[in-house]
Image (tube, rainbow, N blue to C red):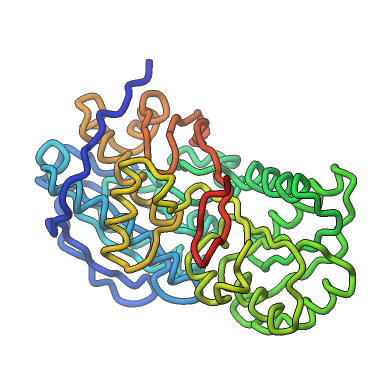
Amino acid sequence: MKKNLKKVVCALMASAMVLSMAGCGGSSDSASTSGGNSGSGGTSAASGDTIRFAVMSPMTGENAATGEQLANGVAIAVEEINAAGGVNGKQLEYEVFDDQANTNQAVICGEKIASDGGFAFAIASNSSGCSQAAYPALANAGIPLISGVNTADFMTNQGFTMYLRICVKDSAQTEQLVQAVIDAGYKAPAIFYSTAETDTTNAQLAQEDFKAAGIDVVGTAQIQPDTEKDYNAHITNFRGAGADVVVFCCEYNPAALFLKQASTLGWTDFGAYGTAGTSNPQLIEIAGADAAEGYISIASYVADIDAASDRSKAFIEAYQAKANTDPGEWAAGAYDSVYIMADVLGKDEAASLSGQELVDWIKANETYEGIMVDVDFDENGDNTAASVVQMVVKDGAWKALQ
């Protein structure tokens, strides 16, 4: 029988946490450790006066905006939990490792986290590929890895027993995205996607889903987002092929540039739908409110304060005060992930567990009611209660699509 979460009431934000930035590619400037052991057993939450955890996030590079979202979501959760007395009286401390959304850097991050010997768990990178790259080192050290936003199916279909995710995986998200396009009446889709493994997979899934529905994809374009910024040729090709809708399988920056450049070229009479990676406030800022108007995304979270629960509304307000912008799913997923682990480690049955025993206990016992999703894990580490929302850019802001 699974136990329901004893909800932690959101408290006033406080500064009783320790944050240190550790660049994974250079010398380490790790924060002081609080004891614990490395190796296959991981670190018991019962050791020491604090509970330390690691955070992987792209704090620099092309995806730094989403990395900042994740880090801010962690910070708000830690501040609230510590202000409310911590976890059984223990304060949470954490250290951020910058993976730069680069798998080679992620390997280094994973090795640094593992060698520290004092982390009870780790919050996964925004990038599924980076989480996959870091996983072996973390698993060997007995450090559970939990993600709020890793959508790639491969994260839970290759035997990663120390991994948990709370969001909907790609195959389900893409199916719902394509269905939304079909339900809107579009007949001539084009697909714009990046070279990232997750985006390439999503583009392939979208093509298969359209084909199964009897709809021909009139054009595809794959871009290298780090080096390719001029999409005029792709826009011209899609327009010439008669595309009435473009499906974006990429992060927010390429999608925003496409919308901006299409508007400049005078092509505005097409629908625009995107995977979760595009659902960032930065898409509106980069594309411009007019070019982004009507853009629809499938995501796990939308910061629509008018439609939010009281707890989600408090989170949105706290995030706006910290970052002067709305939170996306990267922030909300990280926030929920920290609260899940704090709830688990605050329970007598789990407080002395670590490594695989801790993850197995979570899969068998933990449920959670979050601001982004409710959580009930299966044996693979997937969240059986995960769901998505459709969100739309309306009047220069993301809103829940009614």
Is residue 198 in view from this perspective? no
Find residue 252 and report its horizontal and vertical position in percent.
Answer: 56, 67
Percent x, y of residue 232: 75, 83
Q: Is residue 327 above or below residue 159?
A: below
The location of residue 16, given as percent across then percent down, is 12, 56
In front: 57, or 335?
Answer: 335
Residue 97 vs 92, above or below: the answer is below
In the picture provided, is 20 more to the left or to the right than 252? left
Residue for point 73% across, 48% down: 178
Camera-side residue of 311 and 380: 311
User: What is the quadrant of the C terminus in the image?
Assistant: top right
Q: Is residue 395 visible?
A: yes
| As drawn, 235 above or below 276 | below
Judge left or right: residue 375 versus residue 45.
right
User: In this rendering, would 325 be left or right of 133?
Assistant: left
Q: Quadrant of the N terminus?
A: top left
Query: What percent of the width, then of the height, locates residue 135?
Result: 46, 52
Among the 4 quarters of the image, the one containing residue 70: bottom left
Residue beneath the point at 27% across and 69% down: 21
| Above or below: residue 73 compared with residue 50 | below
**In the depicted view, which residue is nearer to us: 18 or 389?**
389
Residue 312 as seen in the image, left or right of residue 184: left
Q: Which corner quadrant of the image does residue 219 belong to?
A: bottom right
State the residue in front, 401 or 141. 401
Question: Which residue occupies 40% across, 47% down?
Answer: 145
